[in-house]
Amino acid sequence: MASATAAATRESRKYRVRGAIVKGFLYLILTLGAIVAMFPFAWMLLTASKTYGEHSQKVFWPAGLTLRPYVNLPPTREIVVDMHPTEDWHGAPASSSPLLEGVIPVHEVSPFVAKRLEREGITLPFNVLILAIDTTDDGIQNYDRFVLTVDSRTVGQFSTRIRLGQWGGPDYAGGPRGRWGPHFKVIDPNPDHFVVKQAWNVWYMFFGNYIKAWREANFALYTRNSAIITLLTIAGVMVTSTLAAYAFARMDFPGKNTLFAAYLATYMIPWTVVMIPDYLIIVALEDFFKETLGIANAWYNNWTALTIPWMINAFSVFLLRQFFAQIPTELFDAALIDGCGHLRFLTQVVLPISKAPLMSVIVFNGIWAWNSLQWPLIVTSTPDWRPITVGLSSFMSEAGAETQLIMAGSVITTIPILLLYFFTQKQFTEGIATTGLKG
């Protein structure tokens, strides 16, 4: 008896040891998988904080994520700049008033920039030239654009353009567009009393690439367009998908199963196959509205072509239909006794208990609409209705790609999707788990 008990104990110990080994191995695999999955995101965040030089030199950890540029910064000061007319700035943009030039003497720089200047053999003080430009043709000298350079009157690669009330700085010893300071902001553009504020804008130093990407790629317009396109697409998908899914799940009509199978089969067709027919339909609708109704750009270069073709989604109908089919028939019978029809039962009974799959539909279609790129490029020819993904392509040219700005723009475009998933993750995971994706 004792030997049998000992043998059972040994077997139990071996089983626990094997279980612990298997569990530890699985945890190790999952941890490695998570690290591999997070690596591209981590690389994107690190690159978004690098300067152009740091990325080209393959520096692993950017200076912007260290304390070096931000410690022991000199005090802020306001400088009255003596401005006078000039004409020898090469490449200067058109101005409605005479171009004005001034000199800003720099006596202090941030410790990080001081080390760069020391390596280049540049000593303090030195001069920053500022060019004032008037872009408003109203007969008044109201300067609102400015160019900053170091000892150069060429408006080009190593100059920085800023607007009135905007922070910026020139390149210091080949540095990244004055990111590490000092920074300048024009606070009074009156030619008789031109005042410039010199400071060290830590937000500009830390988020320099994000600020530059937002300004240069016109992200404000593209973000607005993407938000409108995404919201309209989600609203359209929610209406069409809930109605179609309810009809397939709860209503009886001839050929329902055959029609649903044919409808679901359309999800298997690659989008590249239907892309040209969709485009030809958009062109035909545009011609019809223009020639018959006299309405130009009713479809092309408008939100209609960007949203309406995507307001019907076979996957969303399938997902909701699977969930609606699980709702007990007794609920509909009770609602029918109370005088409910199909539409009232859908809106007052089915939808309130279907929050999980509905959130899944919102997340899926929100991501698809937000990330769309090829279709917007096909049906638009101006930036008026192009989405945010198009803005990322502005940092790629024949001279090369500004990868650090592309990654900063990518982080900006990712934030809304992360927020959407953060606020809907509970319902999203419940929707996938409860629906089960099975008939």
Image (spheres, rainbow, N blue to C red):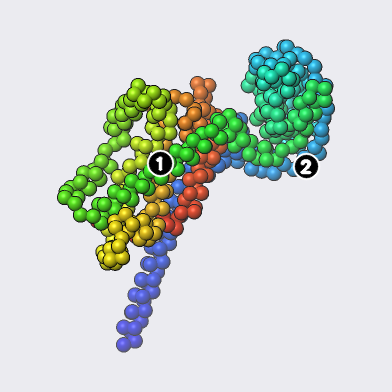
Q: Are marks 1 and 2 in contact (CB under 8 Å)?
A: no
Pinpoint residue 250: horizontal percent, then vertical percent.
25, 56
Residue 71 coordinates in the image, percent (x, y): 74, 43
Q: Residue at x 29, y 53 (%)?
A: 246
Q: Secondary structure at mark 1?
A: helix
Query: Between residues 31 and 162, which one lies in front from this camera angle?
Result: 162
Q: Which residue is mark 2?
A: 72
Determine whether 240 is above or below 96 in the image: below
Where, quadrant-wise, is the N terminus in this rendering?
A: bottom left
Q: Residue furthest front?
A: 339
Task: State the mark number for residue 348.
Answer: none
- Name which residue lies at 73% across and 20% down: 140
Front in this rendered view, residue 140 or 196:
140
Residue 198 spot, x, y in % from top left: 77, 33
How far apart in space, not on screen, are marks 1 and 2 (Cα)? 51 Å
The residue indicated by pointer 1 is 233
* Crowding near the residue tagged with mark 1, few <14, some 14–19, many ≥20 C-alpha atoms within 10 Å: many
Quarter of the image for residue 75 reads: top right
Q: Amino acid at mark 1?
A: Thr
* Residue 59 appears in view: no
Front-lying residue, 101 or 124: 101
Q: Say what secondary structure mark 2 lies in.
A: loop
Locate the C terminus and report the quarter of the image it occupies: bottom left
Seen at 40% across and 34% down, the residue is 304
Pinpoint residue 100: horizontal percent, then vertical percent.
75, 18
In primary-sequence order, the first of circles 1 and 2 is 2
Does residue 290 appear left or right of residue 225 in this picture?
left
Along the line of sight, the residue nearer the viewer: 82 or 384: 384
Residue shown at the point (40%, 57%) measured from the top left: 355
Residue kind at label 2, given as amino acid type: Asn
Looking at this view, name the residue that lies furthest to the left.
254
